[in-house]
Amino acid sequence: MDRGLVAALESAAVRSAVPARIVSELAEGTELPQEIERNAYFVASEALTNVAKHSNATMALVTVALRRTPESDESWLDVVITDDGRGGAESLDGHGLAGLRERLRGIGGSLEISSPSGGPTVISAHLPITTSIASSPAPTD
């Protein structure tokens, strides 16, 4: 990912069989650990593939954002994939979503799935930022 996570996700969206849009809530100049970028890209790409294969959706949205948990002072990268398909996505052993859940668990993250019958499906990946994030300095008054 020579140009960063958002550029890689935009490329995946262009290649997606279902029209997809990327929304980045990351501050300009945010740098993420490579392992986090790779895993976030994999999760989003796999989710977009699942949307095309299983959902009968007409659109997908991928949102990326940083979140800090004040109680523990931990930072998380949240990648949320939403589609307007028929819903009913499940995490079954040996299948795509279970594999994504295991991948994220391996790095200390988590995967949430909301997919009621009739849709929409929302897949939320939460990836821990284990090293300090280098970003542009905040503007001063």
Image (spheres, helix red, strand yellow):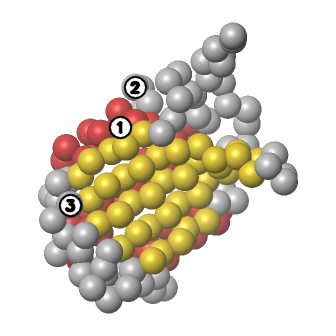
Give the amino acid type for the residue marked by disc 3 in the picture: Met
Is residue 41 visible in the rendered structure shown here?
yes
The residue lying at 42 percent from left, 84 percent from top is: 90
Q: Distance between the residues labelled 1 and 2?
A: 7 Å
Residue 76 horizontal side relative to residue 78, left or right: right
Q: Is mark 2 on a helix, strand or loop?
A: loop
Q: Distance between the residues labelled 3 and 2?
A: 25 Å
Out of 9 and 64, give the one closest to the viewer.
64
Residue 41: give x, y in percent of width and height.
43, 48
| Nearer-N-terminus badge (3/2) | 2
Residue 94 vs 101, above or below: the answer is: below
N-terminal of the pair, mark 3 or mark 1, is: 1
Query: Is disc 2 surrounded by few (<14), some (14 to 19) or many (20+) residues within 10 Å?
Result: few
User: What is the residue that sits farthest to the bottom in this orientation?
Assistant: 117
Q: Which residue is nearer to you in this view: 71 or 55?
A: 71
Q: Position of residue 56 (x, y in %)?
A: 17, 75
Mark 1: which amino acid? Ala
Figure quadrant of the C terminus = top right
Marks 1/2 in contact by CB < 8 Å: the verdict is yes
**Residue name at image x 53 percent, y 22 percent:** 29
Please report whichever mark, 1 or 2, sits nearer to the chain's N-terminal start. Answer: 2
Q: Is mark 3 on a helix, strand or loop?
A: loop
Rounded to the nearest angstrom, the CA distance separating label 3 from label 1 is 19 Å
Q: Name the residue under label 3.
A: 59
Residue 83 picture quarter:
bottom left
Q: Name the residue under label 2.
A: 3
37 left or right of 72 in image: left
Q: Which mark is residue 20?
A: none
| For discs 3 and 1, the disc positioned in front in the rendered view | 3
Label annotation for residue 8: 1
Assign a secondary structure to mark 1: helix
Side of 137 where 102 appears, left or right: left
